Image (tube, rainbow, N blue to C red):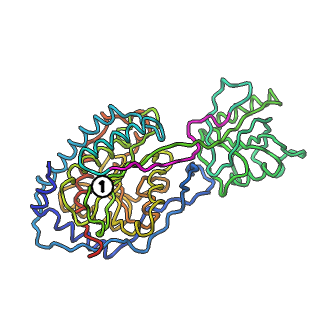
Amino acid sequence: MKALKRLVRLGVWGAFAIALGVALGACGDASGAAEPAGTATAGATLVARATATATAMPTPTAAPVASPTAVADAPMPTATATNEFAERLAAEGIALLTEFTAEHSPRASGSPNELAAAEFIKGEMDALGYEVAMQPVEVEHIPWNAEFVSLVGHEHRELRAIPLAQTGLGDVTARLVAVGRAFEDDIPDDGLESAIALIERGEITFEEKVNRVSDAGAAAAIIYNSERGNFRGALQSEGPIPAASLSREDGEAVLGILADEPELEARVKVALERLDSQNVIAELPGQDGECGVVVLGAHYDSVQDTQAAGDNGTGVASLLVMAEELADNPLPYSLRFIFFGVEEIGLFGSRHYVDTLSETERGDIIAMLNFDAMGKGDASVAGSAALVDAATAYADNNALSIRRITESQGVGSDHAPFIEAEIPAIFFFGDDFSLINSPDDVLEKVEPSIMGTNMAVGMGMLEGFECKGE
């Protein structure tokens, strides 16, 4: 089972150590900054409210990683040896994934099923000899599947609304008043006292629309799309009243009902929900804490109504496989495995973990390796440039295929809070996200080779780090 040790004796890691030393010496930035909140665009992401509030991602000035010593004369591995290692890891990963998805799907954020999955993970890590702790995570957020907009007297009509990012909170039932696109001339002369304003999207920002109807006395706002389908909008600052979006189709249907029923009332409800979750944190006993720590992370929660095999059963299975491989393989620093909860609703598990670290504890982290959504596509990496350079160099030198991806804005995973805190981090994933968060994310559609390649490269990177004190 310990192919890692066999490959170390073969000298697999020499060329990688050279690449990592060069990369870290030349570049210490962390790429992948998130899009600033508050843009009033169709592509803006709904921002959940929580105890750990998301912040803009700064670019660190230096990666706090000591350059490892190069091993220039180490022989290169054969392609067969390296690929066999990745294939074995893939086979072990899919076996664990089969068990995990069969017993723990779905595992929605903050649900009893999520807790059961955490207890399963804890038991597995206990059995491997790790010291395991549950870190409580309390989250307040706006649930995605709530009924945000409804019509009084038309309860049979389903309106699929989406709260605007930075919306105000509240539960308002009031008469509905259509105000066009909410220009100054669209506001009734007698104002909108205690009404719900029905607004068409377009020409001016959501911020201006919502503030104008609020200033006129409106208690809530509904903005329907000017094109087909719905959209995710964002206010530039915290809104004064609850505000949600509708599709053009739903908006025009409501306008039709309002024309026949001038006294029509609507309800807009945007409220916080509290969830209790947990991170599962595991370390080997007796590690040298003076040399720093490398964090290996993956989230284990899911959205509802999906097996969530790719997102992120693959990450859970991969961490468990690597934990077994590394259980008796000494490294010149500590290893910490973290299985994060409540990722799907806003990276709250990883953000809470990072927020609870002291400055000293943050500085002790050499790097964070994140494994997520490895079900489909090509094995890929993104994140801090120095680590991505090292990962791709290791793959190139060891007959493994892995793609370097520039993260698009709005795409995030649990490495992001570490990068925000100026901790170097890398994201291992599959570059086809077409099945994630859908009922089609099932075991049968997972491509095991993505897990195997990403695990082999990730474990290769571990041999390239050294004690921070040296």
Q: Quadrant of residue 302?
A: top left
What residue sits right under mark 1 in the picture?
A: 283
Q: Quadrant of residue 22?
A: bottom left
* Mark 1, other Cα within 10 Å: few <14 / some 14–19 / many ≥20: many
1 vs 81, nearest the viewer: 1
Q: In this view, does 292 lie above or below 317?
A: below
Q: Quadrant of residue 457?
A: bottom left
Residue at coordinates 41% horizontally, 69% vertically from top-left?
360
Residue 285 sits inside the magenta stretch: no
Q: Horizontally, is 393 left or right of 214 in the view?
A: left
Residue 174: x, y in percent? 78, 36
Q: What stretch is highlighted in magenta?
A: 132-149
Q: Which part of the image, by quadrant, shows the C terminus?
A: bottom left
Residue at coordinates 15% horizontally, 72% vertically from top-left?
71
Residue at coordinates 43% horizontally, 36% vertically from top-left?
438
Q: Horizontally, is 23 left or right of 275 in the view?
A: left
Residue 82: x, y in percent? 15, 54
Task: Tell me which amino acid carries mark 1.
Answer: Glu
Q: Is mark 1 on a helix, strand or loop?
A: strand
Residue 142 sits inside the magenta stretch: yes
